Image: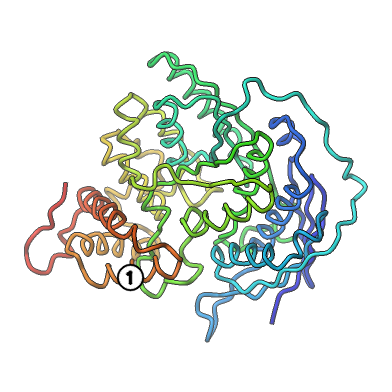
Amino acid sequence: MYDHYVVTGSHSRVLVKGEVHEQALNLNADGFFKALLVLPHPRSLDLLRIAAGIYTIDRITKRKKRSGNEHGMRRISAQFEVDDLPFWSSSSVGTLLWQTIKLLTEDAWELSFVSRRRPTDDLGYQSYLPIVPAPEQLALYSGGLDSAAGLASQLLQGADNLMLITVAHHTGIPQVVQRQLAELKDLLDQQLRLVPQVHHSTLSTFLSGGKAVRLRTQEKTQRSRAFFFCAAAVLAAEAYGLDEIQMFENGVGSINLPPMGGMLGTSLATRGAHPAFLRLMSELASEVVGEAINIRLPNAQRTKGEMLKEIAAEGLGGWVQASRSCVHSSLRISGVTHCGECPACVERRQAFAVAGVPDDGSHYALDIFNESPVSQDNSDYLHLYKKNALGWLNSDPAVLRRMENHLRSTQVPADVDEWLGMLHQRHAQEVLAVYGPREFLSNGSEAAVV
């Protein structure tokens, strides 16, 4: 049985109507476009509205685990109003869109399209003078540790005239990001005499009414967010005639090997920076724009710790403490910015330790180096996290087989297996060097760690 939705809207508001629920997603698109200083193409705006609609549906349709559906796979039928109906109705484009969303969410989707009726508030867009000099590079920027370290690395390597795109899915993100960028600019100028041009545009979004009234009524996984973020970046790429969008995720995080075999092929592990998603999204973006666009991972062969170590050597280790990593983006605990025990916090603290950068434990609700996780799920994850690291260093066939199955099922070619294996072995050494291997050793010996 499918949940049926109809998605309508304008540049400033997307409305999702279901059989029971109705949900609006407000988009501060005027501010976004004004910062870009260009007029978006109607087909690209279709992509943005489709992505916003899918993201909204993803948030308001909870996964229900039951017998025969232990992972909570959903069946969703969605009809979208679009300006370029012949384009979106073509079988090749429809299939490509379906494959992209299916890979991210692992849900059953039925997608259809009708001609858009322009709402009364859809008055078009004002055209602005272009930025001079025009951006030469484009990257997504979330304000997280990978984004911060990746951006700093690019600027240290001489990147200039860089446009950053942020999609703010909660109210705290714009201020955090703006403060980060201002502090980085000052540090680069004062310490290294670097004054790169960094442009920045934020698409602010928020749900209003409907299920947004209570967080507990929303789906927590929200696997389609990356599609929404990339769609916004595609508009910017088209605007400036750029053929590349950078995503600063580290290589281990992009592959995101599930810690258990039962999680393979499910929605339990995010694929928002997975090579298969980026390939499909690049193909879809190229079709929409009519020119080749490639979304790439410049840090695909590095761990988070290696990324942080590079910029720490240039005196920027302290600056990245202002980044945000916690999966609880709306953490409501006074005086702290991170829960300290979720998988993202575990990886964050590991990266700081590997890079030799002091990390103030008072920023975390729980200090993972001195306290055990409160959540049983987080405790189980930490156990598996260390156990898998030991498996990598001992060439455990079960771990190697799980990686191979994960890569082949997500269409990653076998010719990358060797360097991906080496990457995960380096990461495993970091895990055990920071969190310790002894509780998993059955033969009395210690794993070789650095």
Residue 152: which quarter of the image? top left
Name the residue carrying label 1. Answer: 402
Q: Residues within 10 Å of mark 1 (few under 14, many from 20)?
A: some
Relative horizontal placement of residue 85, taking residue 421 as reference (left or right)? right
Q: Residue furthest bottom?
A: 67
Q: How far across and how far down the image is residue 178, in percent?
A: 57, 29
Above-or-below relation of 63 to 43: below
Residue 209: which quarter of the image? bottom right
If the image is split into quadrants, where does the N terminus sit? bottom right
Q: How far across and how far down the image is residue 367, in percent?
A: 33, 47
Relative horizontal placement of residue 221, taking residue 9 as reference (left or right)? left
Relative horizontal placement of residue 345, taking residue 76 as reference (left or right)? left
387 or 132, nearer to the observer: 132
Q: How far across and how far down the image is residue 345, in percent?
A: 39, 49
Above-or-below relation of 192 to 342: above
Q: How far across and how far down the image is residue 174, in percent?
A: 61, 35
181 or 276, nearer to the observer: 276
313 or 233, nearer to the observer: 233
In the image, what residue occupies the spot 66% across and 53% down?
287
Relative horizontal placement of residue 116, taking residue 109 as reference (left or right)? right
